[in-house]
Amino acid sequence: MSELVMVNVSGRDKPGLTSEITGIMGQYDVRILDIGQAVIHDHLTWGILIEIPDASKSSPVIRDLLFRLHALDLQVRFAPITIEEYQSWAEGRNRARYIVTLLSRDIKAEQIARVSAITARHGLNIDNISRLSARPSLNEGDNGIACVEFSVRGRPLDPEQLRADFLHIAGEMNVDIAFQEDSIFRRNRRLVVFDMDSTLIEAEVIDELAHEAGVGAQVAEITERAMQGELDFSESFAERLALLKGLDESVLERIAERLKLTEGAEHLIRSLKTLGYRTAILSGGFTYFARHLQSRLGIDYVYANELEIHDGKVTGEVAGQIVDGKRKAELLVEIAGKEHIAREQVIAVGDGANDLPMLSQAGLGVAFRAKPLVKESARHSISTLGLDAILYLIGFRDSETQLSPKS
């Protein structure tokens, strides 16, 4: 009968090691059942599960590997594996797979410990841990970007409790934790739709307009209640808009020029365009400002509210249908259909209660720096990093997208 042996090698990495090791195995017609390696700070950890045919026996293979690896100043360990152990392991590999993404300004050991404790408590086994972010700077006070991805397998008995546990420790440790199925759609998204105010840009435009009209405090209070989900969006929107009646049209251009993009927004859009994604703004704000962003960022689609202006003055009304939460969800479906993109391939990003319908329609819905109600209701959230952290959620490394500002 053939023999199964697990070979673990560790030591300083150098070119040609894989060729050296497998070359020796090849002389004995060894079959590779599994293989993997990781290199951290030039230190190699290399594992390979092999099947040695009966004609070869294990002794000559192990002898030759020991001599060669000793000469290369590498440590090696051999462990026999039974047929039953292998079959049990192989069957387990077919269980459901998930990705846990840990996002932070700086990854600490406690964060890894608590995330891994939760996965274990819910019956999930960690198969692989990868760093997606660039190596951190050692400069004090550096406002870094850090991301570690866990590949886990198993099926949690209570997915909602698992998510609640992750949300709890995320709040305690000021990190973000995403949990998603490792499906074929994860790295095969094709459309990203964004809310505009407080998502692509830092401001709420209607508040900026209100400030210019001298009704800032009144409008800001209504805006906050609407974003918290305390007021119906359409009613609150009409109420706020009426307070802007008589505002001079020239104010719009000044506001558009001073709007500040959210951290990571420009880099995210640039990366998405390079990767072939389609992008859209679905906003309860105004088309004047959304078009300004479209021109600046190269957004493909824009849907927002048309601010009505007569004789150079804002009338306090909008022309056409109001883009509220329900309409945003409808537009997401319409654009996906037009582009022949499955909803599982759509990412939606927003911060307010009126964004929840479109977040629920997308394959990946992300609450970005959102109010507590929205954060708790959305499947995924980002609060600690910039908008371009979305690239981590779809599995891209800094080396692929140059996400880090230092790369």
Image: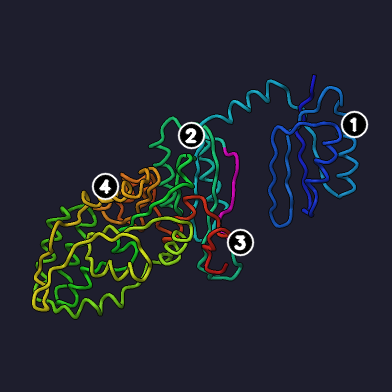
Q: Amino acid at mark 2?
A: His
Which residue is depicted at the point 41% across and 60% down? 387
> Residue at label 3?
135
Q: Amino acid at mark 3?
A: Arg
**Label 1 sits on residue:** 60
Residue 176 screen position, x and y as percent: 44, 52
Q: Nearer the viewer, mark 4 or mark 2?
A: 4
Name the spot of residue 379 as percent of width and height, x first.
37, 45
Q: Which residues are magenta?
A: 126-135
Principal secondary structure, stretch drawn in magenta: strand
> Is the residue under label 1 in contact with that under label 4 (CB below 8 Å)?
no
**Amino acid residing under circle 4:** Pro
> Dot 2: what SS?
loop
Crowd band around label 2 with a 10 angstrom C-alpha radius: few (<14), some (14–19), many (20+): some
**Foreground label between 4 and 3:** 4
Would you name the residue on which mark 2 appears? 122
Q: Is residue 1 magenta?
A: no
